[in-house]
Image (tube, helix red, strand yellow):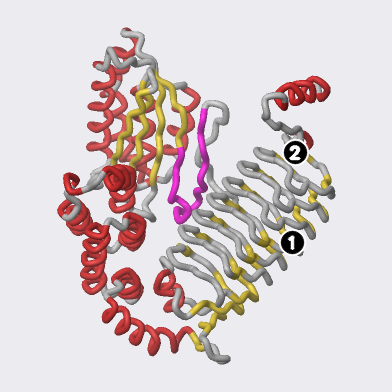
C-alpha cells in the first residue's frame, strides 16, 4: 500500500503538486508512544487515543483538524505549530511550553496544563471546559471569543494578557494576578471579582498589586468616570451589569449598539449582543427593542456591496445571540427528509405541525428557530429553548410524528416517565393526548411515502440541571441523557 502511494506521489510531483505521506502513523493510532521529530510535517486530521507524546518535536507542523483523546504531551516542542480546529479531551500537557502556536477554534475538555505556559499564541474562539491551568502563565496571546467554563487557574500571572471579549463561567482561581484594565472587557469578569472569595489580586503598573475588594470599591468608579468621558459603552454596560445596576447597563447597551450599527462595527455589535444575552436580566420586550435599534439604524439601501455582504453574513448570528437565553436548556434537532423542492406540500405540513407542537408544549417567546437546507432533498434543523422536561416532550412528539425508530422513542419515553412524581400528571393529561393527536398526520406521511430520519439531537445548557449530563444522538451512536452516578 505504501509503495503504491509513493508511486502516486511521484506522478503528482510531475505536475508540480507536492504531496507527502507524513501523517501515516498518526492517522488513527491507539496506545502508541511518539518521541520523534515531526518538524514542518503535515499531520492534519490525526486521531490519537491513549497515546504518549514524549519529547516529540512539532515545530512548524500542521496538525489542523486533529483529535486527541487521553493523550499525554510530555516535554514536547511545539513552536509555531498549527493546532486550529483540534479537539483535546482528557489530555495532559506536562512541561510543554506552547509558543507562537495557533489553537483557533479548538476545544479542550477535561484537560490539564501543568507547567506549560502559553506565549504569543492565538486562541480565538477556543473553548476550555473543565480545564486546569497550573503554573502555566498565558502572555502576549490573543483569546478573543474564547470561553473558559468550569476551569481552574493556579499560580498564574495573567497581567500581560489581552483578555478582551473572553467569557468566563464558574471558574476558580488560586494565587492568580489579573490585568487591571482588561476586567471590564471580560464577559463575566465583574461578577467574578465581586462575588468570588478566590485568592486573586489585580495587577497594576506599579510593583504593588491591589485586592479585588479595592478594585471594586475604588478602581471601578474611576474607570466608569473615564469610560463615560471616552463614551466607551461596552465596559460601562459590562460593569453595571456586574454591579446589578440594570437601568444604567441597559442605557449603555442601547447607546453602544446604536454606535456599532452606525459605524458598521459588526464585530463589536456581536459582543454587545452576547453581553445582553448572557445576563438573562432583560425581558423579551427589551431584547426586541435592542434588535429594533439594529434594524432602525442599519438601512440596507445605504450600504455598499462589501458592507451589505457583512450585514447579511452577521445579522442572522446577531439576532440568534440576542434572543438566545445563554443559561436556558436548548435542543438542536436535525431531520433528513425525502422531500424534493418540486413537492413541498409535505414540508409545509411538517413545519405547521412543528410550530403547533411548540405552541402547546413551550410558551417561551421566540423559543423556536427553524432552518431549511435545500440540499435536494430538504434537511430541517430545529433550535428550541425552554425547560428541559418540556424540550424532551417536544422531541418525543416530533419523533412520533415523523415515525422515527421505536428504540429512540422508547429512550425518551422512559426518561420522561422516570423524571419524578410531578411529571406523571403532565404526561397523562397533556403529553399523551398530544402524542395521539399527531397519529393521523403520521399515517398520512406513511401513506404518501414521505420519509423522515433523525440526523442528530443535541442538548446544551443543561449542566446546571441536577442528575443530568449532556448526551448526543446520531444514527451511528445511540445515546441520550442519563442520570449521573452519585
Neighbour class for label 1 at 10 Å: few (<14), some, many (≥20)?
A: many
Q: Earlier in the sequence, mark 1 or mark 2?
A: 2
Q: Is residue 54 above or below residue 450?
A: below
- Residue 96 left/right relative to 64: right
Give the percent coordinates (x, y) of residue 239. 34, 75
Q: Is residue 459 magenta?
A: yes
Give the percent coordinates (x, y) of residue 252. 24, 70
Q: Is residue 333 above or below residue 286?
A: above
Q: Residue at x 34, y 87 (%)?
A: 222
Q: Is residue 463 above or below residue 95?
A: above
Q: Which residue range is magenta in the image? A: 458-474
Q: Residue at x 37, y 83 (%)?
A: 220
Q: Is residue 199 above or below residue 13?
A: below
Location of mark 1 (residue) = 96
Q: Quadrant of residue 363?
A: top left
**Image mark count:** 2
- Residue 50 left/right relative to 174: right
Q: Quadrant of the N terminus?
A: top right
Find numbered disc 1 in the image and state the secondary structure of the residue it sits on. loop
Find numbered disc 2 in the image and state the secondary structure of the residue it sits on. helix
Please name the predominant secondary structure of the magenta segment in the image. Answer: loop
Q: Quadrant of residue 160?
A: bottom right
Q: Residue at x 64, y 42 (%)?
A: 66
Location of mark 2 (residue) = 26
Q: Residue at x 73, y 43 (%)?
A: 41
Neighbour class for label 2 at 10 Å: few (<14), some, many (≥20)?
A: some
Give the percent coordinates (x, y) of residue 322. 29, 53
Give the percent coordinates (x, y) of residue 29. 76, 37
- Asked whether residue 76 is in view, the answer is yes
Amino acid at each position: 500500500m505504501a509503495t503504491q502511494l509513493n508511486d502516486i506521489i511521484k506522478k503528482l510531483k510531475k505536475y508540480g503538486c507536492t504531496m507527502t505521506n507524513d501523517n501515516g502513523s498518526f492517522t488513527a493510532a491507539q496506545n502508541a508512544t511518539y518521541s520523534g521529530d515531526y518538524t514542518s510535517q503535515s499531520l492534519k486530521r490525526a486521531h490519537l487515543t491513549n497515546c504518549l507524546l514524549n519529547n516529540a518535536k512539532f515545530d512548524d507542523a500542521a496538525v489542523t483538524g486533529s483529535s486527541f483523546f487521553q493523550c499525554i504531551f510530555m516535554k514536547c516542542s511545539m513552536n509555531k505549530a498549527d493546532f486550529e480546529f483540534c479537539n483535546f479531551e482528557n489530555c495532559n500537557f506536562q512541561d510543554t511550553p506552547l509558543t507562537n502556536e495557533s489553537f483557533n477554534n479548538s476545544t479542550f475538555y477535561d484537560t490539564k496544563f501543568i507547567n506549560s505556559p502559553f506565549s504569543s499564541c492565538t486562541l480565538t474562539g477556543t473553548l476550555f471546559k473543565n480545564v486546569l491551568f497550573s503554573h502555566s502563565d498565558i502572555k502576549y496571546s490573543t483569546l478573543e471569543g474564547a470561553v473558559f467554563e468550569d476551569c481552574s487557574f493556579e499560580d498564574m500571572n495573567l497581567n500581560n494578557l489581552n483578555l478582551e471579549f473572553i467569557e468566563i463561567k464558574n471558574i476558580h482561581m488560586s494565587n492568580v494576578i489579573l490585568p487591571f484594565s482588561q476586567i471590564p472587557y471580560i464577559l463575566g469578569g465583574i461578577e467574578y471579582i465581586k462575588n468570588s472569595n478566590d485568592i486573586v489580586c489585580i495587577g497594576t503598573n506599579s510593583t504593588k498589586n491591589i485586592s479585588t475588594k479595592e478594585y471594586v470599591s475604588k478602581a471601578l468608579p474611576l474607570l466608569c468616570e473615564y469610560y463615560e468621558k471616552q463614551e466607551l459603552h461596552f465596559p460601562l454596560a459590562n460593569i453595571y451589569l456586574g454591579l446589578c445596576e440594570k437601568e444604567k447597563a441597559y442605557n449603555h447597551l442601547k447607546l453602544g449598539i446604536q454606535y456599532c450599527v452606525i459605524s458598521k462595527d459588526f464585530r463589536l455589535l456581536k459582543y454587545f449582543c452576547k453581553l445582553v444575552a448572557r445576563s438573562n436580566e432583560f425581558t423579551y420586550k427589551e431584547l426586541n427593542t435592542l434588535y429594533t435599534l439594529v434594524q432602525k439604524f442599519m438601512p440596507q439601501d445605504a450600504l455598499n456591496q462589501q458592507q451589505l455582504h457583512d450585514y447579511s453574513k452577521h445579522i442572522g448570528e446577531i439576532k440568534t445571540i440576542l434572543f438566545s437565553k445563554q443559561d436556558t436548556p436548548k435542543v438542536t434537532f436535525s431531520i433528513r427528509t425525502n422531500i424534493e423542492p418540486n413537492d413541498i406540500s409535505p414540508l409545509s405540513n411538517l413545519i405547521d405541525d412543528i410550530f403547533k407542537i411548540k405552541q402547546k408544549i413551550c410558551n417561551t417567546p421566540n423559543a423556536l428557530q427553524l432552518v431549511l437546507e435545500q440540499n435536494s432533498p430538504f434537511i430541517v434543523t430545529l433550535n428550541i429553548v425552554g425547560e428541559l422536561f418540556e424540550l424532551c416532550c417536544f422531541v418525543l412528539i416530533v419523533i412520533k410524528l415523523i415515525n422515527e425508530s421505536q428504540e429512540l422513542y422508547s429512550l425518551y419515553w422512559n426518561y420522561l416517565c422516570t423524571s419524578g412524581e410531578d411529571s406523571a400528571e403532565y404526561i397523562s393529561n397533556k403529553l399523551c393526548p398530544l402524542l395521539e393527536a399527531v397519529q393521523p398526520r403520521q399515517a398520512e406521511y406513511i401513506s404518501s411515502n414521505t420519509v423522515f430520519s433523525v440526523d442528530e439531537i443535541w442538548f446544551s445548557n443543561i449542566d446546571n440541571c441536577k442528575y443530568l449530563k449532556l448526551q448526543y444522538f446520531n444514527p451511528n451512536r445511540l445515546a441520550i441523557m442519563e442520570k449521573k452516578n452519585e
